[in-house]
Image: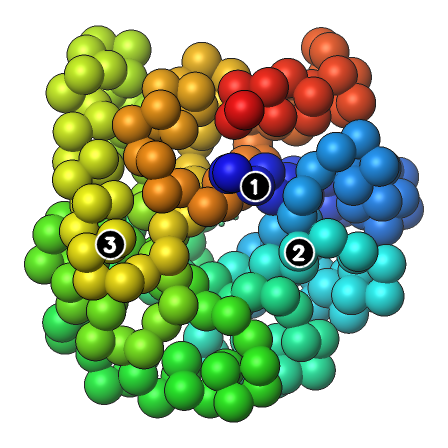
Amino acid sequence: MTKLSVNINKIATLRNSRGGNNPNVIRVAQDCERFGAEGITVHPRPDERHIRYRDVIELKEIVTTEFNIEGYPDARYMELVKRVQPTQATLVPDPPEAITSSFGWDTIQHRSMLQDIIAELKSYGIRTSIFVDPIEKMVEGASHTGTDRIELYTESYATHYQLNREEAVLPFAHAARVASEVGLGLNAGHDLDLNNLHYLKEHLPNLQEVSIGHALVCDALYFGLENTIQMYLKELR
Ligand SMILES: CC(=O)[C@@H](O)[C@H](O)COP(=O)(O)O
Ligand SMILES: NCC(=O)COP(=O)(O)O
């Protein structure tokens, strides 16, 4: 079974655009769970332009499914996850000024740093995942960091899906097989949507979780949040 974790960053972006508390990210997270989401994902960034560090602390009190906190493991991120104790910490190599995530870890170059951070997170009892491109040596490299899972960065799959989905999925199917061979759990995310999700799921039999935000929130404008979550779940079943 592949779990759907809804990334609510974009709900916070909308809220922040007016400075009040509408939409209320706490209520949206509760509703996502009520409508069937199996996890809530947030990705606080240093400028707090969408989800804020304070939101993450408040969300911990109400999230009843899997809580996943993504981010670059700087001191503030590590302090936050230590305090919040989410189900999963997903480490992403984004620089502070990144508009959105655009590449995975070099798990060979950053092996020692990742080993230290992951050991610390695991000492708090938090499951770890690291964001990687679908490149065999980076997946193998991830297995030497001690991480429980990897999250495949699916932007290139999403971009090429329209042109040639057979070719688009090949590196991801291979990376998924390598992950399984080296004993890593498998997540995926970035730019997944109602068009491309099912095909990815079909070709990655060991896919445990997808985190989806941007497209899902856009779809909710047309279909409503409850329908939209049900539509995404259908693609995963
Ligand atoms: C790691 C990943 O792919 C997501 O976290 C994505 O980057 C969402 O972050 P933004 O909402 O800041 O675009
Ligand atoms: N890890 C990916 C994520 O949380 C959401 O990415 P996107 O669907 O907003 O592109």
Q: Nearer the viewer, residue 159 or 237?
A: 237
Tag 1, which secondary structure? strand
Foreground: 130 or 103?
A: 130
The amino acid type of the residue labelled 2 equals: Glu
Q: Position of residue 171 (x, y in %)?
A: 16, 36
Q: Are marks 2 and 1 in contact (CB under 8 Å)?
A: yes
Where residue 73 sits in the image (x, y, percent)?
45, 75
Q: Quadrant of residue 200?
A: top left
**Considering only order in the chain, which callout, 3 or 1, is on the residue closer to the N terminus?**
1
Q: Tell which circle, 2 or 3, labels the residue nearer the N-terminal end.
A: 2
Of callouts 2 and 1, the N-terminal one:
1
User: Which SS class for mark 2?
Assistant: strand
Q: Residues within 10 Å of mark 3 (few under 14, many from 20)?
A: many
Disc 1 to disc 3, C-alpha distance: 18 Å
Badge 2 density bin: few <14, some 14–19, many ≥20, Cα 10 Å: some
Helix, strand or loop under label 3: helix
What residue sits right under mark 3 in the picture?
A: 179
Task: Work out whether residue 161 can be spotted.
Answer: yes
Which residue corresponds to mark 2? Answer: 66
At x 13%, y 71%, the residue is 108
